[in-house]
Image (cartoon, helix red, strand yellow):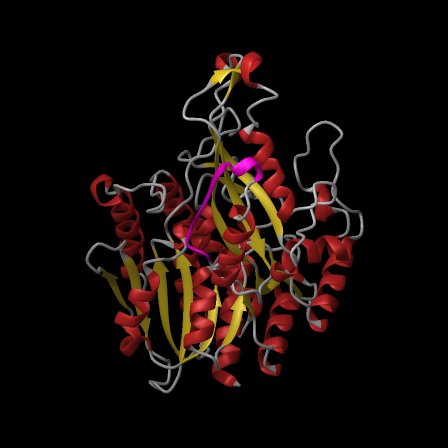
Amino acid sequence: MDYQRLLAMVDAEWERSILPQLHDYIRIPCKSPAFDRQWAETGHLEKAVKLIETWCKAQPIEGLEVEIVRLPGRSPLLFMEIPATDGSTDETVMLYGHFDKQPEMTGWREDLGPWVPVREGDKLYGRGGADDGYAAFASLLAISALRKEGAKHKRCVVLIEGCEESGSFDLPFYLEHLSPRIGDVSLVVCLDSGCGNYEQLWVTTSLRGLVGGTLTVNVLEQGVHSGDASGVVPSSFRIARQLLSRLEDADTGRILPQAFHTAIPEDRAAQAKTSGRVLAESLFARFPYAGTTHAMSTDFTELVLNRTWRPFLSVTGAAGLPPIDNAGNVLRPSTSLKLSLRLPPSVDAPTAAKELQTLLTRDPPYGASVTFQVDEPGSGWNAPPLAPWLEQSIDRASQTYFEREACYMGEGGSIPFMGMLGRKYPRAQFMITGVLGPQSNAHGPNEFLHIPMAKRLTACVANVLADHAAR
């Protein structure tokens, strides 16, 4: 292939066709089913998937078939099939993304908003552009570009789901339903992950798991005067704090029970050292700290391992606490905390969920009424070793389009689909990548898509598809 001509073609199509579509997509508040329980009635997921379907059907790819697949009571899924350039059907490449979005979140810049597409130079602001609305467009453009260069590829299927931000609870049913049409998957390309910077190709080697739930401590049937009750009735907040101390060292943030830890593989530790050296201060400087707050460590390798192979707790919500303006002198009857415990990739999440529930509810202080309502747990994922051809292809693509070596690093978040695929296609190779880099702020305010990164990544995917066919 003429690599520079391919990149020029990709750049032109992004500007001419994909970016206008992403502007329209960002305007659709297609929140994931967990955040829009009435999604079928509001119709936003339907509008988004139809927008993507319309663009995909218009692409000049010979043999392309595009279909919105619907199972009763489940969010729709966009399924595409592209035949191999040589007509073979012996193996399949699966390309994956999603079109559902996280909710609005507060804190957007005054001139921005979650459903307002704004382009500023290299950045396209708005919810979902980077996570993960671009994936369907980039996948088809990669295939189209390599075909125009006369290169070959194996049979491809593209799955764009509508439930990823809710934990992909609809996806197993679609995988089972579509299994005969998917075929024997030998390579998975996922475009829903992150990148350490925008200057080279990043490949995700692992994903953390997650156990979430709601801890509730009840001490009274109703609130009472704090002057009368404090010192007699135990504080529900203090009890909740005591219970969390069973799980977390309050001084260091270390998770105490060994059941939530795992041994870090040597290859992942070595990759963390390389990634830490490449990213250096940007590992912690990229976050919007308040005041004089600073990172938990200045050891770059340790920071990479903290966010990829070690468990950590976040308290993401609370109930039972009135707004400060309405907070009278009352000893409150209860406190509820929403907990999010990230797990190392190889820790079994359902087992960890049972451990966590037992840890928080056994022998409650003062005999208080304590419950922990567990959300659906999600196990992490550790990628299989890269085949030599794929490792060489990834590095060659990074050198070609970024003029820098590829970099490998785990991600702190979860992509439930990867674990499902790893179990279903144990012999498949995985290229997990994405555009969620510094300050792109997926799930938060001011989310943006870094346009040059998305263009170069599209070209990299085209190269890997061609190398997969030629191996």
Task: Decide: is 88 above or below 463.
Answer: below
Magenta span includes 152:
no
Q: Residue furthest right?
A: 299
**Which residue is at 32% across, 53% downward?**
52
Q: Position of residue 253 (x, y in %)?
A: 69, 45
Q: Say if residue 52 shows up in the picture.
A: yes
Task: Write the start and end of the magenta stretch as one range.
Answer: 365-377
Which image quadrant for residue 83?
bottom left
User: Is 424 rendered above or below residue 23?
Assistant: below
| 366 within the magenta span | yes
Can the viewer see residue 58 in this picture? no
Considering depth in this image, is 443 or 125 the residue closer to the camera? 443
Question: Residue at image x 43%, y 57%?
Answer: 135
176 and 439: which one is in front? 176
Along the viewing direction, whichever of 345 and 82 lies nearer the viewer: 345
Instruction: Give the quadrant of residue 275.
Output: bottom right
Give me the residue at 53% from left, 86% from top.
471
Camera-nearest residue between 151 and 246: 246
Residue 37 x %, y %: 29, 42
Residue 39: x and y, percent? 26, 43
Q: Residue at x 50, y 63 (%)?
A: 351
Q: Say above or below: 116 vs 437.
A: above
| Drawn side of residue 251 relative to residue 53, left or right | right
Answer left or right for 435 relative to 114.
Answer: right
Residue 344's spot in the image, x, y percent? 60, 61
* Total labels drawn: 0
